[in-house]
């Protein structure tokens, strides 16, 4: 598979290219909008990673020109513009996903793989039972109650909801949320899981977060008889 990375900052472009190539993808790089349009005109890319703040034109204009063609690949916006209005505008203009800088490469890679696998935009709203997570507005509710989460708590919950019913090891959670290697000694995941349980499970009879003995944690709406209540 071949990707196009559109990024004017050479350091970030090289970092993305090396990372994606290490994951097995062929990568072309464009440092401005004109070059991006030229390359996308002559090559059938499987995915485009697009910065918005380009030296010659706004990335949204590049996105519009790509979307005006008969067929266009999934587009992942990667931008320092992190305000809610910017993210909503990017998605409304036709982006399939939006990731804010600074970012963890493991998260970018996970989003890329989902886009390739599904061939459609990332869902903006996740729901498991009566637990609802709004990915764009970063809002979580259970039943009719709004639940306030810290940024890392939100990231962990989003990761677990996107992998509903799948056991996730502590290593997977650390590498996804913190972008660092899990050394086997830290209890940071267990601490955050306790925080999450106190907020989304404690008041409700049906528990969402389950401990999978010998593996890690899993989120699902059904009770798991093999899972103890607390780590």
Image (spheres, grey):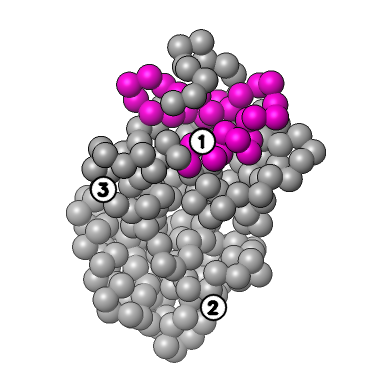
Q: Is 199 one of the magenta-colored residues?
A: yes
Which residue appears at 31% of the width and 42% of the height? 186
Give the label on residue 181, or none: 3
Decide: is 109 above or below 167: below
In the image, is 210 to the left or to the right of 17? right
Residue 6, percent across and down?
Answer: 37, 72
Quarter the C terminus occupies: top left
Lower sequence index among marks 2 and 3:
2
Lower sequence index among marks 2 and 1:
2
- Disc 1 crowd, CA 10 A, few/some/many (<14, 14-19, 20+): some
200 or 64, which is in the foreground?
200
Q: Element type at marker 1?
A: helix
52 or 106, which is in the foreground?
106
| Outermost residue to the top | 225
Residue 103, percent across and down?
Answer: 40, 62
Q: Which residue is mark 2?
A: 61
Which residue appears at 24% of the width and 43% of the height? 183
Decide: is 49 above or below 152: below
Which residue appears at 71% of the width and 36% of the height? 142
Q: Is 185 one of the magenta-colored residues?
A: no
- Disc 2 crowd, CA 10 A, few/some/many (<14, 14-19, 20+): few
46 or 192, which is in the foreground?
192
In the image, is 167 to the left or to the right of 155? left
Disc tally is 3
Mark 2 near mark 3, Cβ–Cβ under 8 Å?
no
Start-end of magenta stretch: 192-220
Decide: is 181 above or below 12: above
| Outermost residue to the bottom | 56
Give the label on residue 194, or none: 1
Lower sequence index among marks 3 and 1:
3
Q: Nearer the viewer, mark 3 or mark 1?
A: 1
40 or 142, which is in the foreground?
142
């Amino acid at each position: 598979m071949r990707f196009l990375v559109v990024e004017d900052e050479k350091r970030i472009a090289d970092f993305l290219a090396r990372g994606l190539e290490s994951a097995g993808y062929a990568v072309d790089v464009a440092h401005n909008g004109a070059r991006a349009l030229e390359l996308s005109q002559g090559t059938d890319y499987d995915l485009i990673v697009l910065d918005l703040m380009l030296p010659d034109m706004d990335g949204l204009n590049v996105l519009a020109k790509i979307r005006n063609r008969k067929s266009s690949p999934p587009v992942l916006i990667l931008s320092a513009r992190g305000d809610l209005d910017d993210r909503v505008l990017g998605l409304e203009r036709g982006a399939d996903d939006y990731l804010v800088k600074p970012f963890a490469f493991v998260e970018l890679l996970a989003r890329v793989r989902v886009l390739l696998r599904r061939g459609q935009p990332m869902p903006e709203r996740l729901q498991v039972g009566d637990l609802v997570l709004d990915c764009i507005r970063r809002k979580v509710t259970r039943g009719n109650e709004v639940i306030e989460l810290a940024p890392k708590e939100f990231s962990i919950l989003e990761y677990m909801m996107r992998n509903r019913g799948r056991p996730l090891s502590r290593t997977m959670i650390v590498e996804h949320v913190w972008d660092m290697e899990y050394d086997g000694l830290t209890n940071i995941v267990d601490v955050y899981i306790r925080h999450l349980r106190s907020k989304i499970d404690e008041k409700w009879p049906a528990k969402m977060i389950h401990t999978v003995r010998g593996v890690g944690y899993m989120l699902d709406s059904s009770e798991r008889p093999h899972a103890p209540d607390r780590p």
